[in-house]
Image (tube, rainbow, N blue to C red):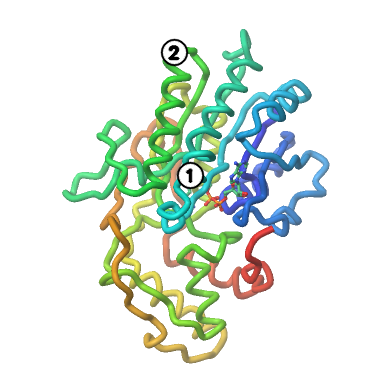
Amino acid sequence: MLVLITGNAGFIGTNFVKKYLKNTDTVVGYDKLTYAGNTENMSEYKNNKNFVFIKGSINNKKYLKEIFSEYDFDAVINFAAETHVDRSYDNLQEFINTNIMGTKILLDTAKESWKNKYEQKKFIHISTDEVYGSLDGEELFTENSALFPSNPYAMSKYYAEYYCKMYYEKYGLPVVVTRSSNNYGPFQNKEKLVPKVIYNCLNKIKIPLYGDGKNLRDWLYVEDNCKAIELVLKKGRPGEIYNISSNNERENIYVIKKIIDIINEVKHVNINDNIIEYVPDRFSHDRRYGICSDKIKNELKWKPETDFETGIENTVKWYLKNTDKNDKEGK
Ligand SMILES: NC(=O)c1ccc[n+]([C@@H]2O[C@H](COP(=O)([O-])OP(=O)(O)OC[C@H]3O[C@@H](n4cnc5c(N)ncnc54)[C@H](O)[C@@H]3O)[C@@H](O)[C@H]2O)c1
């Protein structure tokens, strides 16, 4: 198989390509290398003979067309996106350009380049559980639940999904969408909670914690997500959406304290909770995300393998060993 992977130099893209190249399949990585794309991440796989990297934006229609005519891709996996909620308020235009328009341009390129060959192709779009909005009751969101995105990032992912649905329903493009919960693991940019907490602990910088710290996130070990995406690539049905989560709901305050405990234990230091600084809550901060993954479990036989306590320990140890990678701002 020849697969185009956009956003390969980011967090999930890196983890996915690293794992996926263990197959004999060939990957073309395509990334604009924004602040979130880290060429250092690619050092893990850039010399693999089955890997080619092309620097470019999913908004560049002309360049994408040339690449699609040079490579007869069997599949596309679209990880490329602006992903940080905090940034989405100040840089809304960037989120609209990449997440909505970029996705539309990529869909359009696949639609035109794959004409008359759709049955052999697959377009996987990586979306997020944030499109559902905050969960109020106890019943978890299923793929059929109504969507109420409540921040600009989530809104941009919602509209990108709209195009995915339209290109499947109107043109028959074989699009599959995944909506995963919060990922954690190696290679994440330090603006995100887990690497940020580790970085701040190591550099004795206060850890800002929004509100009362009791916001719940369902933490998914990135390797489990990558396995799910690989299954979707092989067996996911066009036109379908698959939730991916591992039912490891933890409050933010718990996650931070857990990381501090692991650092204290591994590095024989004594960082105490005073390093945590409560700051006013983020505007429109969703209290809880909670999704039901029965569909992918039943249909594609996926199951998460890493519980939060094991995954977070592996993750913290990885960052402690790779502080140089965690120090980088990107690129
Ligand atoms: N991280 C999570 O917890 C999570 C959860 C659910 C869904 N997702 C989705 O998974 C995907 C990957 O997330 P991530 O955490 O790896 O993000 P990330 O921010 O770490 O990486 C995004 C990558 O996309 C690249 N990129 C940005 N704009 C581009 C453009 N116009 N053209 C080509 N490349 C571009 C960046 O350079 C970067 O390498 C995103 O679509 C995100 O919405 C992430």
Query: Could you tell me residue 5's position as x and y percent?
Result: 64, 38
Query: Could you tell me residue 243's position as x and y percent?
Result: 38, 39
The residue sitting at 75% across, 40% down in the picture is 54
Residue 162 vertical position relative to residue 42 in the rendered view, above or below: above
> What residue is pinned by disc 1?
93
The residue sitting at 57% across, 24% down in the picture is 122
Query: Could you tell me residue 310's position as x and y percent?
Result: 47, 65
Label 2 packing within 10 angstroms: few (<14), some (14-19), many (20+):
few
Mark earlier in primary sequence (1, 2): 1
Residue 157, image quadrant? top left
Q: Is mark 1 within 8 Å of ligand 1?
A: no
Residue 43, image quadrant? bottom right
Residue 116: which disc?
none
Nearer to the camera, 103 or 240: 103
Residue 72 vertical position relative to residue 7 in the rendered view, above or below: above
Quarter of the N terminus within the rendering: top right
- Answer with left or right where residue 76 lies relative to residue 156: right
Residue 315 vertical position relative to residue 50 in the rendered view, above or below: below
Query: Could you tell me residue 126's position as x and y percent?
Result: 49, 39
Instruction: Look at the numbered disc 1 and give the secondary structure of its residue.
Output: helix
- Whether the residues at callouts 1 and 2 have beta carbons within 8 Å, the answer is no
> What residue is pinned by disc 2?
170
For the residue marked with disc 1, what is the amino acid? Gln
For the residue marked with disc 2, what is the amino acid? Lys
Q: CA distance from mark 1 to mark 2?
A: 27 Å
Nearer to the camera, 166 or 311: 166
Quarter of the C terminus within the rendering: bottom right
Instruction: Look at the numbered disc 2 and give the secondary structure of its residue.
Output: helix
